[in-house]
Image: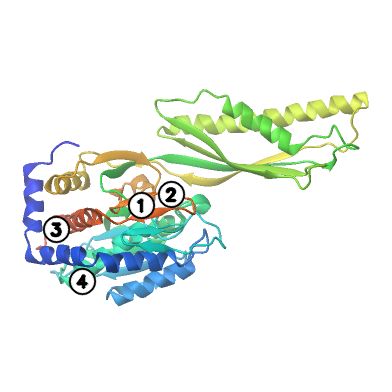
């Protein structure tokens, strides 16, 4: 990333020298144990896909403890709290707000044993890093601002959103940008997701997800041999897709995440299904890959129907033998990109220069897909520390180095709030 303009860097340096900002930094430095206790307490509360309510309630309790206002759980299950901006002269235009979010859901199904183990700075548990780290960082920012009595000149909304993982299809974030009463006031959105401090997801990776289901009459493996086998036919479609020469530039990928079907080793299954994940940095490539998926499934089914008809005619099979299929879209993550010349990108470069961080812009699919696709300045950042074993029961997070990322997030929010205040013609409170 290129060096930020001197004016932007000077603004960051000026904010960082404020006594109250130093007090906020000091709180984060002295309260790492508290932050880790929040993180351990959070991951202990299960949050499977579409079952995040207990964790949302836990988070709302923490929001209230920290003195946030308008704390609630919305219709989709998102946990929301607000830190109102300082009083400012009345303006004809609605006052902008900043949104800081971290998803509260995990990839793990209901009933998954959690049993978090905290050993010094290391936490081991399903979801400890993704996204226990993001939520803990969000709470740390709220606590530091409150402790240091830092008043932002615009409203700051804290959001623990649902539906980021798996088949959640970003439902929590979609709900915010469709129904939140303050959605039109969002001037910038920072997403906290996972560990690290040297990555900024500024390019939202588009993806399409499909559930393919094949249904047949089934039967006995011996007496009904020759009837179409949905598992075999689906496997043939998958093999055809696996032989595609996918584009390396722009990068395009296809993954088969699950395959299910059948009841017994000696029974022709009545049904088989698989879930497909298609991704590309190019919308046209994504569309072409979707066409290939439909073609592979349709051709495999037609071949199976023709083979059964021939076997039936020769007396090598007996009916019924009809084979049906369906292809249902179960996920659609829109693409988007933060322009490198945008004020938000400029602010990130200035903050990183001040903190001697060399940030690498990345392409990924995160909650930031929604705001970026709508033209709202946004990116996704790590919350500091290190993590591993993501999406496994051995997932871990180590908080060493977290403080640098927390300073980065705090300075970003202060700079953005100051920037929005100036753009609306009022005076900054910092």
| 50 up-or-down from 312: above or below | below
Q: Position of residue 25 (x, y in %)?
A: 16, 62
First reached walking from the N terminus: tag 3 or tag 2: 2
| 342 up-or-down from 168: above or below | above
Which residue is the site of mark 2?
390
Residue at 23% x, 67% y is 31
- In-front residue for pair 287/45: 45
Which residue is the site of mark 3?
418
Task: Work out which quarter of the rendered image holds the C terminus and state it.
Answer: bottom left
Q: Is residue 168 visible?
A: yes
In space, the residues marked 3 and 1 are separated at their CA atoms by 27 Å
In space, the residues marked 2 and 4 are separated at their CA atoms by 32 Å
Q: Position of residue 128 (x, y in %)?
A: 40, 58
Residue at 57% x, 63% y is 111
Which residue is the site of mark 1?
194
Quadrant for residue 232, please give it: top right
Q: Is residue 25 left or right of residue 210?
A: left
First reached walking from the N terminus: tag 2 or tag 4: 4
Label 4 CA crowd tier, 10 Å (few <14, some 14–19, many 20+) = some
């Amino acid at each position: 990333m290129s060096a930020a303009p001197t004016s932007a860097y000077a603004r960051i340096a000026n904010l960082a020298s404020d006594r109250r900002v130093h007090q906020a930094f000091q709180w984060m430095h002295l309260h790492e144990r508290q932050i880790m206790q929040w993180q351990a307490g959070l991951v202990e509360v299960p949050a499977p896909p579409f079952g995040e309510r207990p964790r949302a309630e836990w988070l709302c309790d923490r929001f209230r403890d920290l003195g946030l206002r308008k704390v609630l759980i919305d219709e989709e299950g998102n946990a929301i709290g607000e830190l109102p901006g300082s009083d400012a002269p009345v303006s004809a235009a609605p006052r902008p707000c900043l949104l800081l979010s971290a998803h509260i859901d995990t990839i793990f199904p209901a009933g998954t044993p959690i049993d978090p183990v905290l050993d010094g700075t290391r936490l081991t548990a399903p979801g400890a890093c993704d996204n226990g780290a993001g939520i803990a960082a969000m709470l740390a920012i709220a606590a530091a601002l409150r402790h240091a009595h830092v008043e932002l000149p615009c409203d700051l909304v804290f959001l623990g959103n649902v539906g980021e993982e798996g088949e959640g299809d970003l439902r929590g974030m979609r709900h915010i940008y469709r129904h939140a009463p303050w959605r039109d006031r969002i001037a910038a959105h920072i997403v906290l997701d996972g560990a690290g401090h040297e990555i900024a997801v500024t390019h939202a990776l588009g993806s399409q997800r499909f559930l393919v289901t094949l249904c047949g009459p089934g039967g006995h493996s011996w007496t009904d041999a020759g009837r179409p086998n949905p598992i075999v036919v689906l496997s043939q479609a998958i093999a055809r897709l696996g032989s595609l020469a996918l584009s390396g530039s722009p990068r395009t990928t296809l993954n088969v995440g699950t395959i299910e079907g059948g009841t017994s080793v000696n029974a022709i299954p009545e049904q088989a299904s698989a879930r497909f994940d298609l991704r590309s940095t190019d919308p046209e490539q994504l569309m072409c890959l979707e066409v290939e998926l439909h073609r592979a499934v349709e051709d495999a089914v037609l071949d199976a129907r023709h083979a059964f008809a021939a076997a039936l005619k020769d007396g090598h099979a007996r009916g019924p033998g009809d084979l049906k299929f369906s292809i249902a879209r179960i996920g659609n993550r829109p693409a988007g990109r933060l322009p490198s010349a945008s004020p938000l990108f400029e602010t990130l470069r200035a903050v990183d220069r001040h903190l001697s961080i060399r940030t690498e812009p990345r392409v990924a699919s995160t909650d930031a897909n929604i705001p970026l696709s709508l033209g709202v300045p946004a990116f996704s950042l790590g919350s500091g520390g290190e993590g591993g074993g993501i999406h496994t029961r051995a997932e871990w997070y180590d908080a060493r180095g977290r403080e640098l990322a927390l300073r980065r997030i705090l300075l970003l929010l202060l700079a953005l709030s100051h920037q929005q205040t100036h753009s609306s013609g009022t005076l900054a409170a910092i």
